Image (tube, rainbow, N blue to C red):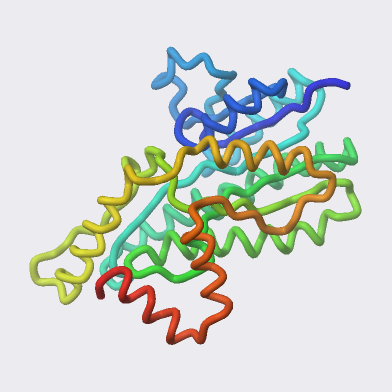
Amino acid sequence: MSSKVVLITGGSSGIGKSIGLFLKTNGFIVYGTTRKLNKHSSFNSFELLEMDVTDVGTIRDAVSKVISNEGKLDVLINNAGIGITGPIEETPHDEILKVFDTNFNGPIHMMKAVLPQMRKQKSGLIINITSIAGYMGLPYRGVYSATKGALGLITETLRMEVKDFGVHITNLAPGDFVTNIASGRYHSPVFENSPYKSAYGNTLELINEGVHDGEDPILVARTVFKIINTKKPKVHYKVGTFMQKFSLFLKNALPDKVYEKLLLNHYKL
């Protein structure tokens, strides 16, 4: 049986690179994407293609190249994403749109690009990397949570729409993992005269302190490997610490205001 062909968006670093390395080690043919190929001239973990999830032309070219090279495309992993923090009131709307364009519109563009080939094959798997943050509104991270929550709902919808074509779509929500997402995250400034100065400033410090305390991305890679080897993937998968996953249980089990109080206490608001 021929090796499965996998395409990973945002494959040059972090979770995407970890997934690609793990899958290649286990016999998969792996392609990753990056917006600026010239920044990764020494990258040799697997083949990288230059592509931007916000540019439909580059998506079309990258998907066509994989299919031309391999004759098929078995797995798409929508991993590329960017972060954003700030009070909703003070976050520039063009920055909000930019994050939605990458985290939400980008995966939709990708799925539209690969579905014709997967229908033709009568087989295929799409894994959308969302976030545990997408299951709840987090203070000063609301836009990021909204993009990931929206992608999770699109995943649920598309599963039902493509079920007769032999294509499976699932949602994998990581908790906090050590990646370079913070380096590309947009932070709304902490303005001196802002009514949010103290609360947002303290929350931002808490978020930044936790950047390097996340789990090893290899845990996400192993979960992806498990999903690929599952005949009928579930709708949702979560990977993270016990407390991160337990927070989702509490979200469903507790009254809304009680859960909101827990979040306020956690963020010291």
- Between 103 and 182, the one nearer to me in the picture: 182
Based on the displayed image, in which of its 4 quarters is residue 48 positioned? top right
Q: Is residue 199 left or right of residue 109?
A: left
Based on the displayed image, in which of its 4 quarters is residue 178 positioned? top left
Q: Position of residue 183 (x, y in %)?
A: 31, 40
Q: Position of residue 15 (x, y in %)?
A: 50, 37
Q: Quadrant of the N terminus?
A: top right
In this view, the residue farthest toward the front is: 242
Residue at the (77%, 44%) spot, across then down: 115
Residue at the (64%, 42%) spot, across then down: 223
Q: Is residue 122 left or right of residue 30?
A: right
Q: Position of residue 146 (x, y in %)?
A: 48, 65
Query: Is residue 39 placed above or below 200 in the rendered structure?
Result: above
Q: How many marks?
A: 0
- Between 20 and 158, the one nearer to me in the picture: 20
Query: Is residue 49 placed above or below 134 in the rendered structure?
Result: above
Q: Position of residue 164 (x, y in %)?
A: 91, 54
Q: Is residue 236 left or right of residue 106?
A: right
Residue at the (8%, 66%) spot, across then down: 192
Based on the displayed image, in which of its 4 quarters is residue 156 positioned? bottom right
- Between 136 and 99, the one nearer to me in the picture: 136
Residue at the (39%, 51%) spot, across then down: 83
Q: Quadrant of the C terminus?
A: bottom left
